Image (cartoon, rainbow, N blue to C red):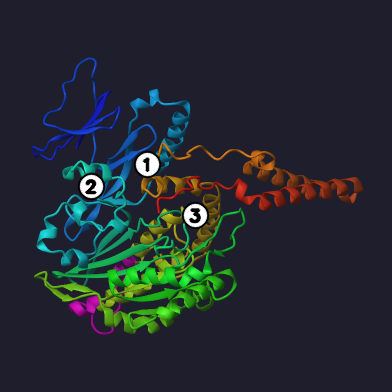
Amino acid sequence: MRLWDFPDEYVIEPTDGSSASSLSINRVDASIKLLDAIPDCNSVRVPKIQTIFGVVGMLKLVAGSYLIVITERECVGSYLGHPIFKVVSMRILPCDNSLKDSSPEQKKVESEFSGLLKVAEKTVGLFFSYDTNLTLSAQRLNDLGDESKLLPLWRQAEPRFLWNNYMLEVLIDHKLDPFLLPVIQGSFHNFQAAIGKEIVDVTLIARRCTRRNGTRMWRRGADPDGYVANFVETEQIVQMNGFVASFVQVRGSMPFLWEQIVDLTYKPKFEIIKPEEAPRVAERHFLDLRKKYGAVLAIDLVNTTGDEGRLSAKFASSVEPIQSDDLRYIHFDFHKICGHVHFERLSFLYDQIADFLDKNGYLLLNEKGEKMKEQHGIVRTNCIDCLDRTNVTQSMIGRKMLELQLRRIGVFSAEETISKHPNLDEKYKILWANHGDDVSIQYSGTPALKGDFVRFGKRTVQGILNDFYNALGRYYLNNFVDGTKQDAIDLLQGHYIVSVSRDMTPPSQKGGLESMANFPAALGLVSVGLFLAVLSLGPARYDLRYLFFSALWATVSLGAAAVVKANGRIFCNRPRLHKPRR
């Protein structure tokens, strides 16, 4: 498309060779209309012209509206024969010329909200297709009726995985189907490898659910309706010799109300909210999964001891009353059984779930597109973050299913495995490692931990060092960055609706310590105190006065550290939008 940036309007002109009308958005009041021709240009109305690759949607704030468009894209492969593109960059186009007539308070609030859009502009992991519906798995696409296949892509889309669902509402209201582009957040990777003289094409897609989307510490557990944090559908697709095979699994936080509020400690305490509600929330969650996927096998990978053990016990007790032939729960203490290096012991887990995988199968289409097999159930995996332990486990399950599929197609013999084909094995490990990193970056801000095992098949010294570095990165981001990022997510996804009648003023600053709270200053004081304490110890053997000063500085450092810990929640970067839509 071509964007005409006039002083008083934006005009989006299709350049695909069709005779479709152009879209005009007024920069004063964001009114929308279709044009048969591009407006005249003159010395007063000189437009800036730019190529864009899609309209993500529009958001209305206090005094203005903002159009979001894709300015750069990258083709990352194909999905069942259709090109798939990754969003490289977006641009926020303000329609806020009326802001000059707003009150100072409105201008201030508008500025704060538009600042969140700048954060949202950097959202990672967005993918789209002009030709096929990325929100649907291969099985659901195959099950679409002929009439549904003729509908616009946004009408076919699964709302849970439509990242720009809320942002499209204004365009939908104006019936602007040609300009509506479904976008998902997640991951997309594929590769081709040789097996003898044959070529296998493997694709891995992640679709992130928007119902309870957010960052690691600010979105935990479930909401009262059973929608869980970090819920991601992962689909592995194999194409070979005209056959198409698809296997879907999901991950998601433990389905009851719990939270972990950051307070500057490395691992804040888990808090179970309304524990009496846990069975009802879990029942709603699993009822929804069974409606969408069929039978469910829940694999819980968390520790049996400590804080994690409390959560695991609550999960088990919440699921116990609703277990049935269609719902199984398995606890597998990943850290106790596998430790930090013996991930091959996941074979013990596979032995427990092999019967479920065999019974519920996968999608298989023959050369004519006819359905030979169908997936009737889903494996749901969780740890605390549903990132590191979960990704290692899902990659093991995916590997086993790929081997089953290749045997079914007739490429592998009964005992043949992926590891016997070095090129396929290496590419498959990299595929899942990249997949885990993408999902992790969106939720925690860093690549996945334990990624070296997924990437290389074993733990390495460099991998352990990378885990340490990424763990520190998560600590910093969770405490000092993710609050603002969470606000931006809530604004984009319609979890917080801006309204002039709302109390949108920033929280009033409190006096005393809270008004002076500044984490860098406090950290600096602690560091300087410890440095001077150590420095004073050297001469202390010759002069006891230095010992006194060393003790004094150590006391100052410990006191400052205690203040920082006690007031951790003051120093942290916390979300400020406290009135959610749902």
Task: Report crowding for label 2: few under 14, some 14 to 19, many 20 or more residues within 10 A (C-alpha).
Answer: many
Q: Which mark is residue 121?
A: 1
Stretch in magenta:
405-428
Q: Nearer the viewer, residue 64 or 47?
A: 64
Cβ atoms under marks 3 and 2 closer than 8 Å: no
For the C terminus, the image quarter is: bottom left
Foreground: disc 3 or disc 1? 3
Q: Is residue 331 left or right of residue 267?
A: left
How far apart are labels 3 and 2 at the CA level?
Answer: 29 Å
Task: Give the quarter of the image for residue 55.
Answer: top left
Name the amino acid, label 1: Glu
How far apart are labels 1 and 2 at the CA level?
Answer: 17 Å
Q: Main secondary structure of the magenta part?
A: helix
Q: Is residue 145 left or right of residue 8?
A: left
Residue 338 at x, y percent in the picture: 50, 76
Residue positioned most to the top: 43
How far apart are labels 3 and 1 at the CA level?
Answer: 20 Å
Q: Which mark is residue 181?
A: 2
Name the amino acid, label 3: Trp
Say if 326 sits above or below 424 in the image: below
Query: Mark 1 or mark 3, which is nearer the start of the sequence?
Result: 1
Residue 468 at x, y percent in the picture: 55, 59
